[in-house]
Image: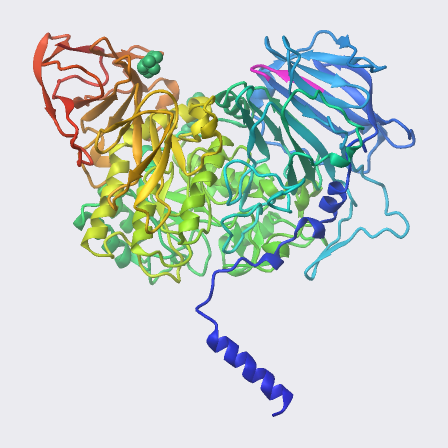
């Protein structure tokens, strides 16, 4: 046999034998740290290698300023350092090249993320410099006031910035404590013989400005764990990446990429990057560190003993337990924020005071969404819509993926498949439902396409290194990418969403931004070349991680303009950056239909919530692959508690609408979706809490129980607000699940009302009909239990209050209601009540700043049922005031999700409105 023939035969055989296309992550498509020169250089630095000292310290414009100079070498240019205090315990450190020494170009500072009101009104103007000697320092350190409890210190030699408690002088957070700070200054022209270009898999990065990376160490004192820096598919607590006995050898990467079939346990960065890390520890509480920088970042969490080779060069106050981390970025400047906490919710509040609070969604957007790549045509849409009704399954939004367009030209419709898009949307709207279409940032290079024509004429595309419109390959084929960094282009883009411009659109249509990392099929690492050019000569490498953020912003602003600023926008985005919470929801991208991906969705969403992105979800069912019906059911049961709840599937998967798997599975999925609908009043209240405080809807256990150490590392369960604890079932054959119930108070099973003591791990039997969920004793949760087709029909429905009493026979909860649609709530158009149960009496109080019965928003909704769980005694009557109406109370099994056997007390039809003050006294 001739060798050639044999080769092809072997190939044929192995092809025939290989199983169905296996899911695989294309590892070699992406760079690791060793293939990334700045990362490799930075990682080789050792403690004490920084020789910078702070000199010329003075006050300027209410900030502390200094020069950073090399201790041994005065030939280089100094760096400028600025330290500013802000209200609420926020310290900002900026280090950049000193402009008075004429650097070859200005380094990129990320605009449009820090809130203007933060910069303008939260700054504390420093009046004087206090100095002190630390250890045997020759130079004095400078102390800066932060708030009553905390102060910051700039140590001069070696240069270090740290925050400490004022009373104990204990450190809480420090930068360059290990002396690993490095800042590669821009150099004028290439030095002889130096290679500035970089190559990776056939792509060349011309790197015209040479190396310009920054790296430094950050230490979290009193920390048991660190969390944050999404997005990756991994545990909630960040494991060490360097040091003895480490789990991963790669640092955590922050570089927005379209990662095909991502792994479920990997430090590799996915679609979004939020360079914000929080720590938590039993003794000390929480602190946070945020580096505002949009270039590629790599972060090491250093395991105990990582600095064994330090030779005693650096000695830190030894009594303090701490976690050290090492931060590296390819470009940009140091613009870093220290948040002092001390509680987890304080850190999140401090972070969102800088980057913005999450937007308040419309009510419909908090309900269930049905998506698929693709609902084929108008008839398919009508059938899916009708089937939901036929099977009594509520849903609110139907989604259309890329195939609805004419040749992947966004803002157009396929004329054969979707001939009457406006009518299609109006039919859905008549049932109170909405539609979402996809709009991506790659623009088809088609001379007949109006977007392409205008963008070309106006010069609105990102340019390649040679100055031509960058041309890459994406869904439409040859595509160019709008330069969303430019506000003029964003404004132009926003106008494209007007009802006149977007033909076939109606006011009930909302938008989904995908592929905005940006994804470029033939680009380096499936993205845009780093040497592409944005407006103001900004290189793509400098702004990469914020590209999707700007696209999301422009789209959201477009929807705002479309409705004359009346209606709250809804835009879902895959890519994100710090601040994306202001523009809408995000999801965890293209996950896979397997149990591991179901499991990892919990830590992924918890991490997003901690870093501001409260409105987030994972594709229910898993995007790639075909879920077994058992997995699909479990996914609906878990997804019902995701802040963003959407079923979605890849084009190559089988149809999987909830009614396709037999009667019993339909029933189980219907039940799961109904649980979400009944809890919507509670969810909406939590969305408003996130909108006013930054505290996310979904919370890790330790955020609610900060001194319960067992909870610190838990990520198979989570809190929904402060009242509900949910535990997923992540195993096909699970008969039992061990659930840790934190705190000292008890917990009531949501379905049966059975109480369990807190601070215990319960091994619970699980049936197919639900996943474990509990209400915390001492809380009140609001529901709407009448089942409707969509949220529109629920508006006037009465409420159920579920009161879970604690050992002192008390409970409280809040309810927030507004019109669910407009911005009237910003000027007082809402109802905000507190319900308190104490000494046998339930009282309703107004907690809105305006009087109840608010003219801008009111509702006649009543309470139809009050359920008491726990030690209520055996009262017979309920006396309702005002009115002095007496009603009898009932005893019986729990009604809703109704399998209950324990006897609960129910008050039926007390005849009170949720918008009014009243009391109900049990006797
Ligand atoms: C709440 O969300 C709206 C947007 O929906 C935003 O304008 C507002 O600033 C957010 N925060 C507060 C405190 O209202
Ligand atoms: C019971 O709950 C109320 C309201 O949440 C709370 O104020 C009280 O401290 C709790 N009592 C105990 C013993 O935990």
The reply, left or right, for residue 906 in relation to residue 135 is left
Vertical position of residue 455 compared to residue 346: above or below: below
Is 334 in front, or is 327?
Answer: 327
Q: Position of residue 757 (x, y in %)?
A: 31, 25
Q: In this orientation, which residue lies closer to the viewer: 879 or 200?
A: 879
- Name the residue rendered at 34%, 46% in the picture: 635
Left or right: 409, with 339 as reference point: left
Instruction: Name the quarter showing ligand 1.
Output: top left
Please give left or right for residue 869 compared with residue 509 in the image: left
**Which quarter of the figure is the N terminus placed in?**
bottom right
Q: Residue furthest bottom?
A: 1
Q: Is residue 835 visible?
A: no
- Residue 87 belongs to magenta span: yes
* Residue at 70% over, 53% down: 35
- Where does residue 536 sit, x and y in percent of width and height? 69, 40
Scheme by which the image is coloured:
rainbow
Residue 775 seen in the current view: yes
The picture quadrant where one finds residue 43 is top right
Please count the marks in the image. Answer: 0
Q: Is residue 457 above or below residue 101?
A: below
Q: Is residue 392 left or right of residue 115?
A: left
State the quadrant of the C terminus.
top left
Give how far across and how far down residue 398 sits, in percent: 31, 48
Instruction: State the extent of the magenta-drawn residues as a range.
Output: 83-89
User: To which quarter of the image does residue 478 belong?
Assistant: bottom right
- Residue at 58 percent of width and 54 percent of height: 480
Q: Give the x, y percent position of residue 773.
A: 30, 34
């Amino acid at each position: 046999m001739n060798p050639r023939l044999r080769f092809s035969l072997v190939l044929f055989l192995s092809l025939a034998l290989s199983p169905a296309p296996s899911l695989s992550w294309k590892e070699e498509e992406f760079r690791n740290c060793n293939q990334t020169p700045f990362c490799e250089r930075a990682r080789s630095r050792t403690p004490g290698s920084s020789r910078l000292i702070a000199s010329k310290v003075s006050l300027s414009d209410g900030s502390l300023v200094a020069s950073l100079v090399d201790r041994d070498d005065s030939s280089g240019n100094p760096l400028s350092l600025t330290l500013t205090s802000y209200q609420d315990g926020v310290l900002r450190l900026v280090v950049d090249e000193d402009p008075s020494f004429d650097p070859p170009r200005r380094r990129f500072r990320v605009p449009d993320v820090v809130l203007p009101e933060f910069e303008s009104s939260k700054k504390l103007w420093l009046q004087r410099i206090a100095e002190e000697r630390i250890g045997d320092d020759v130079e004095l350190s400078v102390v800066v006031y932060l708030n009553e409890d905390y102060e910051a210190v700039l140590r001069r030699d070696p240069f270090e910035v740290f925050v400490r408690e004022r009373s104990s002088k204990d450190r809480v957070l420090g930068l360059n404590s290990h002396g690993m700070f490095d800042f590669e200054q821009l150099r004028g022209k290439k030095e002889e013989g130096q290679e500035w270009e970089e190559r990776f898999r056939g792509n060349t990065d011309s790197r015209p400005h040479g190396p310009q990376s920054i790296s430094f160490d950050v230490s979290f004192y009193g920390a048991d764990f660190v969390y944050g820096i999404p997005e990756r598919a991994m545990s909630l607590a960040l494991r060490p990446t360097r040091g003895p006995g480490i789990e991963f050898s790669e640092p955590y990467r922050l570089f927005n990429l379209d990662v095909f079939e991502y792994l479920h346990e990997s430090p590799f960065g996915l679609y979004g990057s939020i360079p914000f890390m929080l720590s938590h520890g039993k003794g000390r509480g929480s602190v946070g560190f945020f580096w505002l920088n949009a270039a590629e970042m790599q972060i090491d969490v250093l395991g105990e003993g990582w600095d064994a080779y330090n030779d005693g060069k650096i000695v830190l106050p030894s009594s303090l337990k701490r976690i050290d981390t090492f931060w590296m970025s390819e470009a940009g400047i140091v613009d870093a924020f220290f948040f002092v906490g001390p509680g987890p919710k304080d850190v999140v509040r401090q972070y969102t005071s800088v980057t913005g609070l999450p937007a308040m969604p419309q009510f419909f957007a908090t309900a269930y969404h049905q998506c698929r790549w693709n609902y084929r045509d108008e008839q398919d849409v009508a059938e899916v819509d009708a089937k939901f009704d036929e099977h009594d399954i509520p849903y609110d939004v139907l989604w259309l993926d890329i195939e609805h367009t004419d040749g992947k030209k966004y803002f157009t419709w396929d004329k054969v498949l979707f001939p009457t898009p406006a009518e299609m949307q109006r039919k859905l709207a008549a049932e109170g439902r909405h539609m979402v279409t996809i709009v991506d940032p790659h623009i088809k290079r088609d001379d007949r396409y109006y977007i392409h024509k205008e963008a070309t004429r106006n010069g609105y595309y990102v340019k390649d290194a040679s100055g031509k419109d960058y041309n890459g390959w994406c869904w439409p084929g040859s595509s160019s990418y709008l330069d969303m960094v430019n506000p003029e282009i964003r404004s132009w883009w926003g106008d494209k969403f007007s009802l006149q411009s977007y033909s076939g659109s109606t006011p009930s249509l909302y938008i989904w931004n995908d592929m905005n990392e940006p994804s470029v099929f033939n680009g380096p690492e499936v993205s845009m070349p780093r040497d592409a050019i944005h407006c103001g000569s900004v290189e793509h490498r400098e702004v990469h991680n914020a590209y999707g953020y700007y696209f999301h912003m422009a789209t959201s602003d477009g929807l705002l303009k479309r409705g004359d600023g009346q209606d709250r926008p809804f835009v879902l985005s895959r890519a994100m950056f710090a601040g994306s919470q202001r523009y809408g929801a995000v999801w965890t991208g293209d996950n896979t239909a397997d149990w591991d991906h179901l499991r990892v969705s919990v830590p992924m969403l918890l991490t997003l919530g901690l870093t501001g992105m409260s409105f987030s979800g994972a594709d229910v069912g898993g995007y790639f692959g075909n879920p077994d019906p058992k997995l699909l059911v479990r996914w609906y049961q878990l997804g019902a508690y995701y802040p963003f709840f959407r079923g979605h599937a890849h084009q190559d998967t089988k149809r999987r609408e909830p009614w396709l798997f037999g009667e019993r599975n339909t029933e189980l999925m219907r039940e799961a979706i109904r649980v979400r609908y009944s809890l919507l009043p509670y969810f909406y209240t939590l969305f408003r809490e996130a909108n006013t405080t930054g505290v996310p809807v979904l919370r890790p256990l330790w955020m609610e129980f900060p001194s319960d150490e067992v909870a610190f590392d838990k990520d198979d369960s989570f809190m929904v607000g402060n009242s509900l604890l949910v535990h997923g079932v992540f195993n096909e054959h699970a008969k039992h699940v061990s659930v840790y119930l934190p705190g000292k108070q008890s917990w009531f099973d949501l379905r049966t009302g059975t109480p369990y003591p807190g601070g215990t791990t319960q091994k619970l039997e699980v049936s197919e009909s639900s996943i474990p969920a509990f209400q915390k004793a001492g809380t009140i949760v609001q529901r709407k239990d009448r089942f409707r087709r969509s949220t529109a029909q629920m508006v006037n429905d009465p409420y159920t209050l579920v009161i879970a009493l604690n050992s002192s026979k008390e409970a409280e909860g809040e309810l927030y209601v507004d019109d669910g649609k407009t911005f009237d709530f910003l000027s007082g158009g809402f109802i905000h009540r507190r319900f308190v149960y104490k000494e046998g009496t339930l009282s309703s109080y107004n907690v809105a700043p305006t009087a109840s019965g608010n003219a801008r928003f009111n509702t006649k909704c009543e309470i139809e049922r009050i359920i008491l769980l726990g030690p209520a005694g055996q009262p017979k009557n309920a006396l309702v005031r005002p009115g002095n109406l007496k009603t009898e109370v009932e005893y019986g099994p729990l009604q809703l999700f109704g399998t209950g056997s324990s006897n609960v007390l129910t008050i039926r039809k007390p005849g009170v409105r949720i918008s009014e003050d009243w009391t109900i006294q049990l006797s």
